[in-house]
Image (spheres, rainbow, N blue to C red):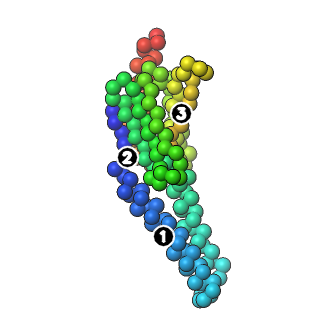
Amino acid sequence: MRLSNRSKTSFYNFINTLLIMMVVFGIIGFLANDYRFHALGNESYLMVIIPVLLLIFFFLNGRQIFEYDSDGEALHFKNRNIIPFLSKALHDEFPKYKLIKYDVVSIFFIKRLYITVSSKNNGSTILKYQISYLTRKEVNDLKLSLNKVVKTNKEKKD
């Protein structure tokens, strides 16, 4: 099964650009009000604070692009940001039989995928992916696919 939200990259770029423009125009509006017009009192700080908080929220939600591929004998995970220099892209590939378990943790708007993989050195390794920008259907499809792999692995062990 393949799952990707790469087609939404242009939408995420638009939102990012819009938020940056809101911050810039908020700063310009704040400075114009503070030095020239004096129309707003302390409320003028909101012209800067609200866009900055929205921008921070956008990036704290995690990497925007998530790709998953379970075709063949290996599992492929890719997780990257729309702006490449903000965070390092994650790319992992391992055989299906190494998957032990997975967890999807959802707190408010933030969703994380934790994959536990068996390894030679220390027994198991936990891989973390940010899946906040996946839709509910995409998350359910991902869970279904990973459930199949985990179930197959448990049957082979028994």
Amino acid bearing label 1: Met
Q: Position of residue 147 (x, y in %)?
A: 42, 27
Amino acid bearing label 3: Leu
Q: What residue appears at the point 40 percent right and 62 percent down from the top-left corner? A: 14
Q: Which residue is mark 1?
A: 21
Q: What residue appears at the point 53 percent right and 72 percent down from the top-left corner? A: 24
Q: Which residue is mark 2?
A: 5
* Residue count near mark 1 (Cα–Cα under 10 Å), binned few <14, some 14–19, many ≥20: few
Q: What residue appears at the point 34 percent right and 50 percent down from the top-left corner? A: 7
The one nearer the camera, 137 or 120, is 120
Checking the image for residue 127, the label placed there is 3
Label 3 to label 1: alpha-carbon separation: 35 Å
Label 2 to label 1: alpha-carbon separation: 25 Å
Query: How many marks do you count on the picture?
Result: 3
The local secondary structure at tag 3 comes to strand
Q: Earlier in the sequence, mark 3 or mark 1?
A: 1
Amino acid bearing label 2: Asn
